[in-house]
Image (tube, rainbow, N blue to C red):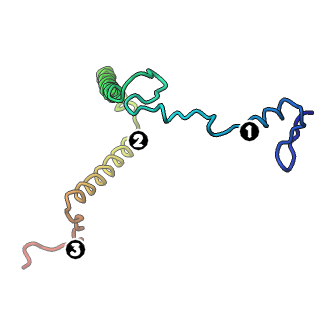
Amino acid sequence: QACSVGGGGRRCSPGSPAHSLRLRDALMDLKDIPDRWKRFSPETPPYKYFPNRTRKQTMVWSWMAIAGFTAFGYLLAEVVDRHNAGKEEIYQEYAKQNMSYEQATMIKDQQEAFKGILMRARRQRLGLPAQAHGSVEIRDPFDS
């Protein structure tokens, strides 16, 4: 057994290949480590892909990629929307024919709840006060 792991860390017996590797690592000096920053040029950073490109080329390609993917996404959304437009009417008719009264009532109530939430948010966004609740007292308009 060349090396053993104990409480004090890893210990290797002298003469083993692992021991000579550990000695070599311990004897390595900082001047032996290559200094990559001395070779660093801010105009051509060390990129992994297309290593000889400039920063301006990187920026141009990045903006072109953003524009290209945005256009592709928009066109894909349009194609899907056009494809599903014909099916929308079919699904509406199918839902009307096969939906129970309870389901229709639940959907209508949910739509009204969302409408109320959106109206309150709109009033708040416009800086208007919350709607005051009406009085529940019945008054005769002809009694003065």
* Circle 1 crowding by C-alpha within 10 Å: few under 14, some 14–19, many from 20: few
Disc 2: which residue: 103
N-terminal-most mark, 3 or 1: 1
Q: Position of 76 compared to 128: left or right?
A: right
The quarter of the displayed image where residue 16 is located = top right
Label count reads 3
Task: Please tell me which residue lies in front, 64 or 94.
Answer: 64
Q: Position of residue 78 (x, y in %)?
A: 29, 24
Query: Counting other residues with Cα less than 10 Å from the Cα at mark 2, is it few (<14), some (14-19), or many (20 or more)?
Result: few
Q: In which quarter of the image is the C terminus?
A: bottom left
**Horizontal relation, residue 35 to residue 109: left or right:** right
Disc number for residue 114: none
Quadrant of the rendered image containing residue 55: top left
**Disc 3: CA contacts within 10 A as few (<14), some (14-19) or many (>=20):** few
**Where in the figure is residue 54, as x and y percent of width and height?**
36, 26
The amino acid type of the residue labelled 2 equals: Gln
Q: What whole-number distance in Å separates the C-alpha atoms at marks 3 and 2? A: 35 Å
In depth, the one of 36 and 122 nearer the eye is 36
Which of the two discs, 3 and 2, labels the residue nearer the N terminus?
2
Identify the residue shown where x is 33% and y is 45%: 108
Where's residue 82, x and y in %? 29, 21
Q: Which of marks 2 and 1 is nearer the N terminus?
A: 1
Q: Mark 1 points at which residue?
A: 27
